[in-house]
């Protein structure tokens, strides 16, 4: 009998709206992540440094991120892992024409200003929402 090991899916931690503060419970929730995605309103570059101590970080700029350090952050990012794409932006209310310059079809979308939303290729126009945030309460 031959057994094939299925490659492990990467663990991606998603956080947003830290506004300059990374709580210890957020760091504990992100421990063990292979990658951390910050969906905007980081607040200070020190937040990114604290997150990078846990795992590599991909971050986007939120409407409250200002200054030279924040200008280095893109407004959107596409994270690709294990054949899946995660489209990251802070404000999903921005006009659609400014959202993706890459034209990438994604299987997940994460935004900071609202809860986590998921769309699938089978239903690209219907997003199912559920809050999965390490930085704020779900309500």
Image: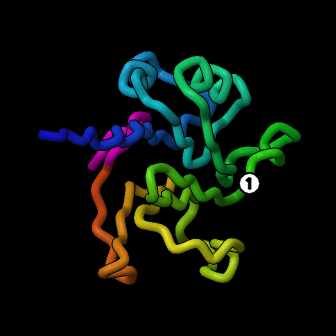
SS at mark 1 in the image? loop
Label the magenta part by its dominant secondary structure: loop
Magenta segment: 132-139
Q: Is residue 27 visible?
A: yes
62 on left or right of 68: left
29 on left or right of 80: left
The quadrant holding residue 43 is top right
Give x and y (percent) for residue 82: 44, 51
The quadrant holding residue 98 is bottom right
For label 1, count other residues whose C-alpha is less than 10 Å away and answer few (under 14), some (14-19) or many (20+): some
The residue under the point 58% across, 72% down is 104
Task: Say whether residue 91 is magenta.
Answer: no
Q: Above or below — where is 109 with respect to 15? A: below
Q: Residue furthest front?
A: 1
The residue under the point 31% across, 50% down is 131
Report the residue marked by disc 1: 74
Q: Where's the N terminus, which quadrant?
A: top left
Q: Above or below — where is 71 with respect to 109? A: above
**Residue in the foreground of this view, choosing between 108 and 47:** 108
Task: Say whether residue 135 is magenta.
Answer: yes
Give x and y (percent) for residue 78: 59, 58
């Amino acid at each position: 009998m031959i057994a094939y090991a299925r490659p492990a899916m990467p663990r991606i931690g998603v956080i947003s709206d830290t506004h300059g503060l990374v709580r210890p419970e957020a760091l504990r929730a992100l421990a063990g992540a292979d990658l951390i995605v910050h969906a905007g309103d980081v607040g200070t570059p020190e937040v990114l440094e604290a997150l990078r101590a846990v795992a590599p970080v991909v971050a986007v700029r939120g409407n409250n991120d200002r200054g030279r350090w924040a200008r280095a952050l893109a407004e959107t990012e596409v994270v690709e892992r294990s054949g899946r794409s995660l489209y990251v932006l802070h404000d999903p209310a921005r006009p659609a024409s400014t959202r993706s310059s890459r034209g990438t079809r994604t299987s997940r979308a994460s935004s900071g200003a609202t809860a986590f939303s998921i769309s699938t290729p089978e239903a690209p126009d219907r997003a199912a929402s559920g809050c999965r945030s390490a930085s704020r309460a779900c309500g």
